[in-house]
Amino acid sequence: MSRWWYALAAAALALATAWVIGPTGEKPPVQFARPEPAGAVAAPRGLSRYASPIRYAYSPACDNSSVPCGPWILVAWDGERGALPGTDAADSLSLSPDGTRAAYLRTSDGAYAVADLRTGAVRALPVRQKDGTVGEMFGAQVPLFSLDGRHLLIQRDHLDKDDEIVLENPMIVDLGTGAVRHLPAVGQVVGWTSAGLMTMTSRRTNSLPGHTTSASFTVWSPQGEAVGRFTLPGNLAAGAVPSPSGRTTATLARDITPDGVVGHGIVLTDTSTGKPARTVAPRLPADRQATSVLRWDGEDAVVLRTSGPRGETAYHVVDLATGAARQLDVRMGDVADRLLEPAELGVVLGKVRQ
């Protein structure tokens, strides 16, 4: 897919801040700010072997500019850092939950690849994204490792004739055999459970009092078979993230007020009944607010993205028994923060607990 349409979108957004206005009464000449990336991070010739799992990866800025450059940078639990060759910091990356593998779209030939970060081995998958991806900012689905790391969800995207983004039917790739299973049109990808991939389809409803929408969830086995279904009202479905067992979903409860968005905690919903089981109040620092549930860490904790008073992004692991929050050591100052892809999209979490 050509990136020209998105380059034009970027130029249009940049116009508001990058033009230089001439004397009154004259048409202002337009000058776009084009920061030149200096000191780009060079990709190593071969993939390094990491002795400890990867904590997170980030899309780096060059010489303190907001322009991402070079490959993604991996940060291991033992402090080792290194570039991931074959990647572009502007493209999507995924890490396995145990921090030992990375999946990405290879820049050289447009093939999806999986790197074993312990051995340095790289395997190209039989799936290609011919013209690149539009990126997560514009609605693309990043690859997702299954909980055991044996399968990978890939959902390609392209632009239609009207430059609208189209997400193609998802695929599940067996990373051991390379076999690809094609799923039917399934709506929105939600995440993996131990039983398989969970997807969601929303619809308007008159059957749930007090709700205008509901959502149907389906769990697909790695072999492409539907093995579970349940329904939630729309307010509990939006942003819902399934637990590893699939028995519970976590959703942020928020209200929009004249003073801003007010958080009311993490709602845990029993998928067998479709009703909230309990609400957990995360004990975050006073100046921080949860903005999204990213994933679960086992059955007893969730990982949150949070925002500070000036919009600073951070990541916290919340114990669902006590509400205690532990901030992850992610250096956001290293991350590129660009107009069409904010810093929060430039961080990918790996193993969050040592």
Image: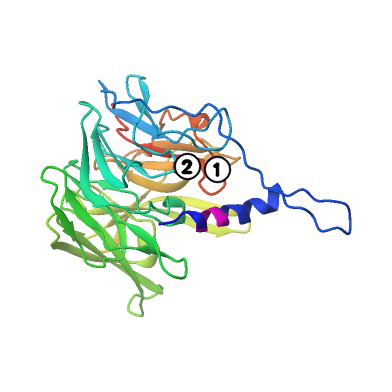
- Dominant secondary structure, magenta: helix
Residue at 10% over, 45% down: 177
Between 314 and 35, the residue placed more toward the observer is 35
Residue at 45% over, 66% down: 164
Residue 209 showing in the rendered view: yes
Residue 14 on the magenta segment? no
Q: Amino acid type of disc 2?
A: Glu
Q: In the rendering, which numbered label is found on residue 21?
A: none
Magenta region: which residues? 5-9
Residue at 19% over, 61% down: 182
Q: In the rendering, which numbered label is found on residue 344?
A: 2
Residue wearing tag 1: 338
Q: Of the two numbered discs 1 and 2 on the same chain, state the one appearing first in sequence.
A: 1
Q: Amino acid type of disc 1?
A: Arg
Above/below status of 138 relative to 318: below
130 vs 123, left or right, is right
Residue at 38% over, 67% down: 234
Residue 206: image quadrant is bottom left
270 vs 285, left or right, is left
Residue 7 on the magenta segment? yes
Helix, strand or loop at label 1? It is loop
Quadrant occupied by the C terminus: top left
